Amino acid sequence: MFDKQRSGRLRAVLVMGTLCAGAALVQSDLHLAGVNACLAASSSSPAQQPKTTDTNEKNRAQPAWSQPASAIPEGESFELSLKDCLVMAITNHPDLAVTELADGQAGDPTRPLFAVKLAKNLGLATTPKVELLNRINAILYDTEKAYLDLILARDRRRIRQEMLKYAKTSVKETKRRILIDASEVDVRLVQANMQARLSELSFAEEQVEAAEDRLKLLLNDSKLGLPSGVAIIPTTAVLTERVMVDLYDQILTALKRRGPSIEGDLNKADRASHGRIILEVKDACRRVDGAWERMAIEAKCVEEWTNCLKVCEMMKELRAITPGFINKLRGFEERLTLARLRHVDAKVAYMMAFTSLGRATRTLHERHILRLKLEE
């Protein structure tokens, strides 16, 4: 009796153990099958896109000025050079009266195209040309600065877009190695890096829109009004070659155009005025030289970090990809991004230094060959 009960219990234990082991094996097989299916889906078929609703009907019902920038049809943009923007800013400025000259269209590049004077509604019967020149150079300086800010913002956005692409690739490669040597922590790290890139790109998009709005305000053109949402595409390239500046010539030009006469004896007020002008010109020349040096250094940094990434790409071709390698690659990409951003900043700063020098010497309209005839 005792032996039968013991054998029955032993048989039940064996049956239960077999069932538990079978269930564990089935669960393990299902887990592996699910992971393999995810890997196959990520490598062979693209991810299913979320269903989106067509917003064209709602956009048509809204006025143009109330539609977001994303609702503007593709191709709604204007390609403008820096010179185009400067001419628009001068001709559309409310404080200036601009008249197009017929003889300026005769093909002679030395003849002025526009006659410019202060508007009559300013209450000034006669205005010295020096005051008019100061006003024109201030307008040109603000417009050129806004144009360069837009170039900088668009270049920064482009770099952020490329870095987001790299981050998405890192996420994909790390997930593919989850069954080999990547851990859940590795996946979380690359995903967090991708979210950071998304945030940086969102901020860059805002900076582009803000730069476009500042430029549109200065251009004061009906086709490029702030409510329009039309994009401005700069076509003028920034300087990449060194331009030598003679400090003495720049000071002499500035004194002739801005200050009191440099001939004869100067009183205390004249000396103080000349001193301020000379200081402004010297500061602008120093910025030109300093910006060039920084641009050359940052270009070298970009070259070195680009070479590091090329080595990493060669290692990827040799299939030497591990989570540690992916983290190192991400570090190289981060440093390359910072170097490229600094290089873009330096190039725009180099252009801006020449703009400051032109404002100091009152030669901005001549530097861009705007062909203006200044009238009192």
Image (tube, rainbow, N blue to C red):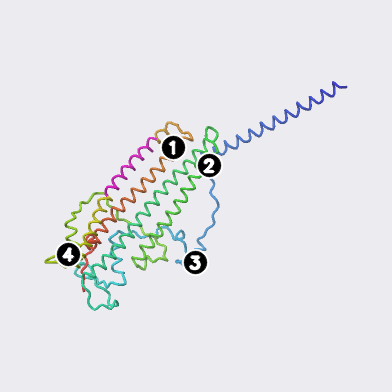
Q: Please say if the residues under marks 4 and 2 sit with CB atoms less than 8 Å apart.
A: no
Q: Is residue 319 left or right of residue 95?
A: right
Main secondary structure along the magenta-highlighted residues = helix
Q: Nearer the viewer, mark 4 or mark 2?
A: 4
Q: Residue at x 49, y 38 (%)?
A: 173
Label located before the other in sequence (1 or 2): 2
Label located before the other in sequence (2 or 3): 3
Q: Is residue 8 left or right of residue 50?
A: right
Quadrant, the N terminus: top right
Image height of 315 relative to 295, above or below: above
Q: How many marks?
A: 4
Instruction: Indicate the amino acid at tag 3.
Output: Gln
Q: Nearer the viewer, mark 1 or mark 4?
A: 4
Residue 328: numbered disc: 1
The residue that disc 2 covers is 188
Q: Residues within 10 Å of mark 4 (few under 14, many from 20)?
A: few
Label located before the other in sequence (3 or 1): 3
Instruction: Indicate the amino acid at tag 1.
Output: Lys
Q: Distance between the Cα atoms at labels 3 and 1?
A: 49 Å
- Tell me residue 319's x, y (percent): 45, 32
Q: Nearer the viewer, mark 3 or mark 4?
A: 4
Q: Please say if the residues under marks 3 and 1 sit with CB atoms less than 8 Å apart.
A: no
Q: Residues within 10 Å of mark 1 (few under 14, many from 20)?
A: some
- Find the magenta span and give its range: 292-311
The residue that disc 4 covers is 256
Label located before the other in sequence (1 or 4): 4
